[in-house]
Amino acid sequence: MFQDITAQIAYSSSFPYLATALSVTSIAGTIGWRWWKQKNTYKSLQSLPSPPKHWLLGNIPQILAAVKQKKFFKLLFDWSQELGPMYVLWNGSYPVVVLSKPKVIEDTIINGMRDGSLIRTKRLRQAWNDINGSIMIGETATEWQWRRKAWNPEFSSSNLSKYVEFISQACEQVIETLKEAEPSKEVQVDPLFVELTMRVISCLVLGIPVDKNSTSPEGPPLEVVKVYEAMSIVGYRFLRQATGEKMWMKYLPTKNSRDYWTARQYFKEFLTPRVDLALRIREQNNTDLPQVSPLFRESMLIKIAAKELKYDRKTLIAESVELLIAGTDTTAHTLSFAVGELSLNQRVFQQARDTVDQAWKSQGTINAENLKELGYIRAIIKETLRLYSVASGSTSLQTQRDTVIEGKVIPRGTGVSWSMLAAGRDPEIYANPDEFLPERWLDKSKDSLLPMIDFGSGPHRCLGEHLSMLEASMMLALLIYNFDWELVNGRSSLEELQQNLLIYPSDKMPVRFRLRKWD
């Protein structure tokens, strides 16, 4: 009996060591299995160049460090320059093939999403839907299709033509703000353009007047600074999660988490009154309620709620947040970069002015009638997007079966991403890629058509492309007609860039405007 007790004591005292040994063995086995799986499943990727990586974490440390420094876009661009037009990075044991040839990117997206061989990655869909709930860009297959079908007509060029008056009004407010500024005063144009684009998208989607001095009875006023702060917080949250941060980390007692939940609550308070009113109108089948303004009755929110019964309060709020984000920063930052390049390229500026002056003569302003005459202005915007693709490095897809890209077999389950900044500087496609040459977009001959992939490709092409080109063309034309200007910080404003969800000028693009001197 004493021997049995002794044996039990000996066994009990050795149990912690045995458990530890088993744990270590289990961990080692898991690591070994992951290594074996990576080596065998993705064997065909071993011949692709890859940045130096951690043996277990892959390139996650470099990626997360770049996101924290708000330089993720630059990391992808630098790797593209160093490793070539097709390389593989490792998100732990998960490979992501990165492309930087414009035609390859375009063909890969169009063909892959058409035949189902490529879909948005699960991580990316989760990150999109974690912004404020389930949204169009966070869905795939039939769930994506019905949402896209509902919104497509609202953003068509024909439908947007009726909003030209509101867009013009918002642009004129910017012109008046600049005219009221002292001639020697520095004006940070990026926040100015953010307000412009936010007022326009809020008008179209939510029926909020673009006139900053007007209010609407349907809900709280548009507080540009507060809305933009909330957008920036959830946008940065998306980028962190899309590049490796775990979803559950939003529940930790950190400043990032508190800011995230505060931003979500703000969006809810801002949007709920209008969404609830739109749903009440749908239920009552009556758009002539006395408390509803004509602008709200014509808003996209009312139309979508009426024709697509699958949308409820939660999804309409989430979709509204998505459209506010998508319709603000993209065009605003592009306008800032265009203003910067025009300041440094007087030949282009003068040709743009000649184009605007010619269009102005026919109408005495810029409106729906003469916008079609601004081909050179649209070329400036396209050239700006080529050099400063504001959405570079925030999107990726995943192969659903073995896929061939540029003769290389890409195994099922591989991520596929791209660097738009690197693609825009491909010397095989764009002659003199570092020069700002809008003329390259005006050659309409079949052999000279350049890929314009900044708005995406295929059925997933950017929903707001027409709106963005309309806003940017009108705003840029009015600026060119009324002002001369110079960059306060010179070319550094175009070189010192950061990335939240999108790329933007670090210094907010300070400019000195001077009223045009007429001959």
Image (cartoon, grey):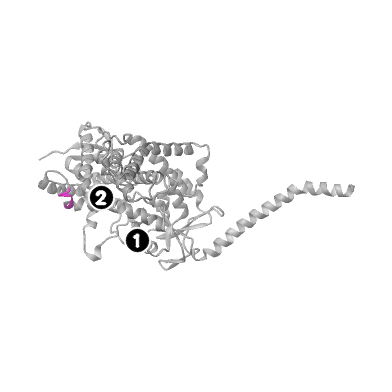
Say the numbered circle drawn on residue 106. 1
The amino acid marked with disc number 2 is Met
State whether residue 397 is above or below residue 223.
Answer: below
Q: Residue furthest right?
A: 1
Say left or right for 512 vs 228. left
Q: Nearer the viewer, residue 482 or 276?
A: 276
Q: Residues within 10 Å of mark 1 (few under 14, many from 20)?
A: some
Q: Residue furthest bottom?
A: 407
Q: Residues within 10 Å of mark 2 (few under 14, many from 20)?
A: some
**Boundaries of the magenta span:** 368-372
The answer, for residue 393, to whether it is visible in the render is no
State whether residue 57 is above or below residue 110.
Answer: above
Q: Residue at x 60, y 56 (%)?
A: 31
The amino acid marked with disc number 1 is Glu
Residue 313: quarter of image = top left
Residue with the mark numbered 2: 469
Say the numbered circle drawn on residue 65. none
Assign a secondary structure to mark 2: helix
Find residue 223 and report its horizontal and vertical position in percent: 33, 34
Marks 2/1: CA–CA distance: 20 Å
The answer, for residue 74, to whether it is visible in the render is yes
Find residue 133 and report its horizontal and vertical position in percent: 43, 46
Q: Nearer the viewer, residue 457 or 314?
A: 314
